[in-house]
Image (spheres, rainbow, N blue to C red):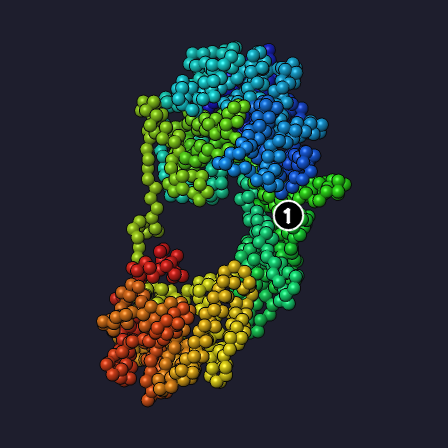
Amino acid sequence: MTFLQQTANYIYAKHSATAQQPLDHVWVILPTRRAVTVFQQELASLADRPMLAPHMVAVDDFITEAAGVQLIDNVSLLFELYDVFRELDKNIEFEQFVGWASVLLNDLDRIDQYRIDPNYLFEYLTEAKAIERWTPENHQHTPALPHTPAVSNYFGLFSNLKAAYYSLRKRLLAAGLAYRGMAYRLLADDVRLRVLDNPAYEKIYFVGFNALTASEEHIIRVLTNTPKAELIWDVDSYYLDDPEQEAGYFLRQYKNQKGFSGFKNRTGHVGQGGAESVGIGNTLTTTPKQMRMVGVPTASLQAKVAGQLVDQFDAEDDAPSIRTVIVLADETLLVPVLYSLNESVSDLNVTMGLSLRSSLLFTLIDTVFEMQRTMMEFRTTEGGASKIPKFHHRQVVKLLNHPFVRQYEKLHGLLAPDQVNELPRPLLDWILSEVVTGKRAYLGEHEMLDLGQGDPLFGVLFKRWRPNHPSDAINALFKLIDLLRDVYRHSQDTIEIEYLYLFFSLLKQLETTLNRQTEAAKLAKNAPAVTVRSFQQFLYELIRQTTIPFTSEGDSRIQLMGLLETRTLDFERVIILSANEGVLPQSRRMNSLIPFDIAIEVGLPTYREQEAITAYHLYRLLQRASDVTFLYTTTADAYGNSKGEPSRFLRQIEHELVQAANGNIRFSKPLVRVADGAGRTDTVILSVPKTDTIREALKTYLTENGLYPTALNHFVACSMRFYFERVVKIREEEEVDERIDSAEFGTWLHNTMESLDKNYRMLDLPVTPDLVQRVLEDEYRNLMKGRVADTGYNLLFYQLAKDLMQAFQTYQNQETIEKGIRVLATERTLQTYLPVDIGGDVVQVKIGGKIDRLEQLADGTIRIVDYKSGVVKLPTKIENLAESLTSLADKDNKWEKIRQLWLYKYLILKENQYPDKPVEAGFYSLRTFQKEPAFLTNRVAFSDDNNRDTYITETEALLTQMVQRMFDTTAPFAMTDNIETCKYCNYTKICGR
């Protein structure tokens, strides 16, 4: 029998129709509203005829009703507190106030809940802070705190706390309002008049309470010292009788205190009127139980395991009659758990709320605020003092990819402007491609409106908010909600629609309160108190506190709730998620302005009491359960909450409770293994067999696109990369980065040198430092487009490029004079075809390359030049040339550059444009050209006399060998075993490296 069934039987028997006190004069006070619902059902099941029910209420509702006040909402309470502090300190800023206001309100709530003497506490706290600030005169080792506004504000806050507490209390009482703790204190201070002497309360039962606050304790003690009230505990002797067991910490205190009754053993005790008493039981150790502790790698996997357990329970014959609860110690797992349950689970009750922070709407709002926060101002192209604010591209892209914005685009049929010879494409895809191709790291308001083709959504999303006008933010959010109505109506997502309604109501409440504050500031001739930044802080705090409460019947077979909601409820099967140290119990952090030692001194609870409360809730939940599963994660989370260790409560259950149960509890630790779809758990080396289809795709690539040095290097380094990139043509998604990366840096320098060679050196025109600077700037604008170069890394890269280019062009001018260098061509593409037999089928493989520069020395030597913006290191020793060029065991990739120049020289010789001239190939490194040798020559040679025909013949033989290897069906495309090669590869996620 459950605790509430026992309680209902006890109360019903004492107040049956024959009793002097009918049930409709009885008050039953329970810890939660869910408990009230279940108790109502249990009581109704006992009656065989209609009757007037007792007053069954949750304790918070009872307190506020008996105290004669209404609870104030969070928004109004915060602004009431702000008005109080403005009266005490005219210089207080709302932005600073919002940072600690919610913490202070929580402290005030606890102060009243525990009936702490505010005079003693605040005077103690003020003196402690004064000592903290005090420094003895002439003390050399103790530096004095600086007299800054921040320090003054910090200590000024504590000196004003006492006055603020009384002023806030006075303001609220005048309006008939109170915060929760204040309502409790009001009733505790006047409980005799409001409850004890009030004929409306004839008989009161306090059911299932444990850790009472001082206000609750005083109220209950006064009432239970008379026949008017009675306490009904839910206690087990296991933790009550053990002085070391923290679950019974509070109950042992109450048992030994005068005025608290109900601590009697159930066995053999009969209450007043023949009703069976509800007292101390021993079901925790005497009821047969199956307990298991399961560790899983991730938090989300817990949800899947919980779903599988529910499916297993449903398959059992007695499933419909057995109640199951899924308890979330970490309530952020609510949505994953809901999705993990089988669609057949329809009889489900959720006793917790979905936070507004968990909604898609919040992610949209958060992105809009972040976009406004990360705006930067840039000088206009004409210079001067005026600046243009621009949005950061990351937030713009994130916003345009938001599901609601995408749905809006689809509903309104937004298309890109007409493109020549192109089919219409979605507007947002076109805008995103424009951002990427234009390298628009920052985008202005008007720029976004133009890209958005004047659609009203762009006018709302990309309008700048004035920093000191939160009304801009409120108006924009209202317009956004209005524009998204059709999206919500079309999606028919009930939860998201509820989120939208909640947010709209919250925004309306904020607008009303802010308008009132603004008017008050105008009358007082004060500056506006709320900025956009402080408004965001305040809004986010309210969003954090706002949830969608689920409403359903309490008799569902499967219940989903947090640990606090389980108070007084019993279930046969229990599944507890996130049973980790740091979550159950929570980590030892008290978010309070009151230091730990002062809290202990005045009698405020600390983490110690909170851990005892959690222990009681856990052990009480286990008392009448027969099947219990604890799930915990074996890895620490990113927020430092879970440490990847099971809760110490689980260790206590395993080593203490199981032993005390004398065989009634079977405890196990089953393992969860995660395998791939084929059930394998070993590391898989990814490979792709060369089927006929793949061989045809490879043939098409080699004949149409051609085999260039880069593709050849990729095949040698990792054939799987070659397959992804060249055969199936998987491309990495392009992104915009406001910072210049190394590849773009090299391209910029290459383009600059090409322009100087083509437009000046090939025409025998002088190359001056001013010209170099101008061409460098022009090429930057052509390549980087919307990327700025006047701040951060880009400024450093710009200065580096300028220094490198000026020094290299000065060197080139000297070389032109000393060696008579003449530039013959720049960025020249060379091609030839090589017939390769691949097993009876001859493939005409295109061999190609693009050389940076072709020049001729005064002695007639033709030189192939490749520029490198980085350091070039060539092998110092060549032992087996053919093997080195074709080997797949090039672990350090040191032959990549050699292979590149080898092919360049082959293509020049094959072209045979300079038959009588010696040909050499090499590198200019812009980092090392000032050292000897300045030109790094490729030393690949197939004969001592460097014969042309031998070079061509040997090269074609090696290329034929490598192409045949590409088509070899016995050697699939496979991942390299050289992990170093994978560091900068774009396909590591596919390979799982």
Identity of the residue drawn at 41% across and 80% down: 815
Report the residue marked by disc 1: 532
Q: In this view, does 545 lie above or below 686?
A: above
Query: Residue at left 37%, top 41%?
Result: 634
* Quadrant housing residue 236: top left
Q: Quadrant of the C terminus?
A: bottom left
Name the residue at the bottom extreme: 916
Q: Is residue 298 visible?
A: yes
Residue 75: image location, x then y, percent? 64, 37
Q: Which of 797 and 272 is in front in this view?
A: 797
Q: In this view, does 407 lie above or below 263?
A: below
Residue 104 falls left or right of residue 971: right
Q: Residues within 10 Å of mark 1 (few under 14, many from 20)?
A: many
Q: Is residue 319 visible?
A: no
Compare residues 549 and 308 and report the one nearer the observer: 549
Q: Where 961 falls versus 790 (above or below)?
A: below
Q: What element carries label 1?
A: helix
Query: Hey, what amino acid is under mark 1?
Result: Val
Q: In which quarter of the image is residue 515?
A: top right
* Image spot of residue 362 (x, y percent): 57, 47
On-image quarter of the N terminus: top left
Residue at far right of view: 523
